[in-house]
Image (spheres, rainbow, N blue to C red):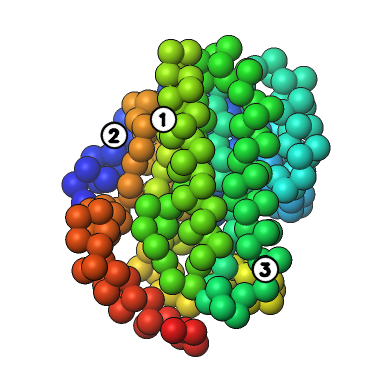
Amino acid sequence: MDMKTRDLINSIHKSEFCFTDKVVIITGASSGIGKACAFKFAEMGAIVVLAARRENELKNIENEIRQKGGACLSVKTDVRNEKDCRCLIEKTIGNFDKIDILINNAGISMRANFENLDLKVIKEIMDTNFFGMVYCTKFALPYLLNQKGTIIGISSITGLTPLPGRTGYAASKHAMDGFLNTLRLENINKGLHVLIVHPNFTTSGIRKMALNKNGKPQIESPRDEARMMSSEKVAQIIARATLNRDKDIVITYEGKLFVWLHKNFPAISDRIILHEMSKEPNTEF
């Protein structure tokens, strides 16, 4: 872990109740980074609204937050469905009258070379990772502008670099980056804060649910999860970056190095990426 990341994590522990009475919507809140953000923002005083498809998991998280004295509402939401996204925003306003922060975290991954990929996998990933963000952002935007609030997109290092075997995932994250950076400029004089987060590989369960070439979950992660940054540490960094009103963060030293190499020495970064990804079991290239 690099020094800047360590400083961010240490400083977050010194900040208590920084988000008191702030209403925070988190999509994909039933696991991974979304779940960790739910607990972290609630711990810091926020009213958290949890959105995901898995209602039982949402209710368990909601109950745990309430038992700890936090304020929480869970709304079963499939972000691929425009009506669900509108309903999420309407229920939040109906209960709390405002929205201060929207964390667009819902996402799925994939693992297959495009040559062998069923096109329905690309569509499902774009519907979830990109259009789900677009729908939630569209319906929440008027309320966020009223609050001079924050829109957060949980992108990926893959939103800035290529990643073999993940064409659909990379496309969705590049699209997220382009959308949110443009949204920032459109609202630069209105006080809207837009933060794009680029985590490196994170222990979140996303790889176990990643779709194979036929659109089925691959079940087993192809990487060593124990060596990755935890979702809880990522959530701490996101909370601090939100307070600082940062525009863009790349998480982990390795992530920063890969992004820098790709920008300045793309031929070298391509070779490194290919070498690393070829170590995955049952790789197709």
Give the percent coordinates (x, y) of residue 32.
54, 54
Disc 2 secondary structure class: helix
Q: Is residue 219 above or below residue 148?
A: below
Which of marks 1 and 3 precedes in the sequence? Answer: 3
Nearer to us in this view, 277 or 220: 277
Is any part of residue 241 visible from this angle?
A: yes
Q: Nearer the viewer, mark 3 or mark 1?
A: 3
Q: Nearer the viewer, mark 2 or mark 3?
A: 3
**What's the amino acid at mark 2?**
Ser
Q: Are marks 2 and 1 in contact (CB under 8 Å)?
A: no
* Quarter of the figure that contains the C terminus: bottom left
Horizontal and vertical percent for residue 139? 69, 27
Q: Which residue is mark 3?
A: 119
Of the pair 169 and 45, the residue shown nearer to us: 169
Q: Is residue 275 above or below residue 47?
A: below
Q: Which is more toward the observer, 70 or 148? A: 148
Q: Which mark is residue 11?
A: 2
Q: Nearer the viewer, mark 2 or mark 1?
A: 1
| Residue 103 found in image quarter | top right
Which residue ends up furthest to the bottom in the rendered image? 282
In this view, 221 is above or below 23: below
